[in-house]
Image (cartoon, rainbow, N blue to C red):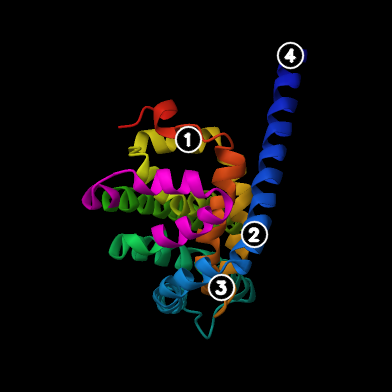
Amino acid sequence: MHESIQARASTVASTGTGLWAGGSAAVRGLRRALASEGVRRTYVQLLLALWVLSLVLVAGLVTVLWLLTPIAPDASLWATIGLWATRIAGALMLALVGPVLALFAVNIIFPMLSERVFFAGMRELDPERAAALEEAEGMSVTRSIKMSVARMLYFLGWTLLAFVLALIPVIGALLGPAVQFWMTARIMTWELLDPVFDKRDMDLHAQRGFLRRNGASMVGFGLPYGFLMSLPLVGPLFFGLAQAAVASLYVEVLAPRGEDLALESGGR
């Protein structure tokens, strides 16, 4: 039992360290992205598509939520409170879901935009590694799109679970958004690292293995960006910065010595 307690304590400590490392990389990456002229040039190309699509998705999803939760004029006080709690929790969750769905959509329709922003950020940190990775042949466009679609379906599955949890009386209004926030941070960072997985030619199984090994750091990176991106109107403006900033997470935390991730994870 003593060994079990030690193992749990070690796991908690490891998770805390990973969250701190990921969060620190998010802050460093944001500063570098804001200061980089190369990032600013490529950032504008990604910005407009993400901003417009995010606003449309969030507005549309919240409208659907309101239509699905009508409040009858003769509804009891508790029923009215319950429906408003569901609406508020749902709106918070959709504020997180909409921008990430926009990211998936843009990566599927315009896969090269995110790649350009990522490598602009990586060149600021390690030009040689950036050049070597950028020159790799990587996946075909079709295979890369399939990976983004698979990640999007995975995200939608967790989103559905979070909405089901939000329907639980009393605790659901807190539990649903909490699960959504955590998984949004995790899966958003996964999608932001797509240029690495693409160039390393890592299939979905290898990517999920990498996610399991580095989940805490990836969540730590994604939490502040998940919050920023959920802000009405201005949230989508941070997408391009997050895409450039994730290079700091990759270079300094996930692969600080330039390990071949595909080799460790099984490649194809």
Locate residue 48, reporting x and y percent: 42, 78
Tell which residue pokes out farthest to the right in this image. 2
Q: Gap between marks 1 and 4, in whole Å?
A: 27 Å
Q: Contact, CB < 8 Å: mark 1 with mark 4?
A: no
- The residue indicated by pointer 1 is 210
Q: Earlier in the sequence, mark 2 or mark 3?
A: 2
Locate residue 95, reporting x and y percent: 53, 69
Q: Gap between marks 2 and 3, in whole Å?
A: 11 Å
Q: Amino acid at mark 2?
A: Pro
- The residue indicated by pointer 3 is 235
- The residue indicated by pointer 2 is 224
The answer to whether one can see residue 181 in this image is: yes
Q: Nearer the viewer, mark 3 or mark 4?
A: 3
Mark 2 surroundings within 10 Å by alpha-carbon count, few (fewer than 14), some (14 through 19), many (20 or more): some
Q: Amino acid at mark 3?
A: Gly
Mark 4 surroundings within 10 Å by alpha-carbon count, few (fewer than 14), some (14 through 19), many (20 or more): few
Q: Gap between marks 3 and 4, in whole Å?
A: 45 Å
Where disc 1 sits, the SS reads helix
Q: Which residues are magenta?
A: 115-144
Q: Amino acid at mark 1?
A: Phe
- The residue indicated by pointer 4 is 3
Where disc 2 sits, the SS reads helix
Locate residue 234, reporting x and y percent: 57, 78
Mark 3 surroundings within 10 Å by alpha-carbon count, few (fewer than 14), some (14 through 19), many (20 or more): many
Q: Gap between marks 3 and 1, in whole Å?
A: 28 Å
Q: Earlier in the sequence, mark 2 or mark 1?
A: 1
Q: Earlier in the sequence, mark 3 or mark 1?
A: 1
Q: Is residue 7 above or below residue 98?
A: above
Q: Earlier in the sequence, mark 1 or mark 4?
A: 4
Where disc 3 sits, the SS reads helix
Nearest to the observer: residue 136 or residue 50? 136
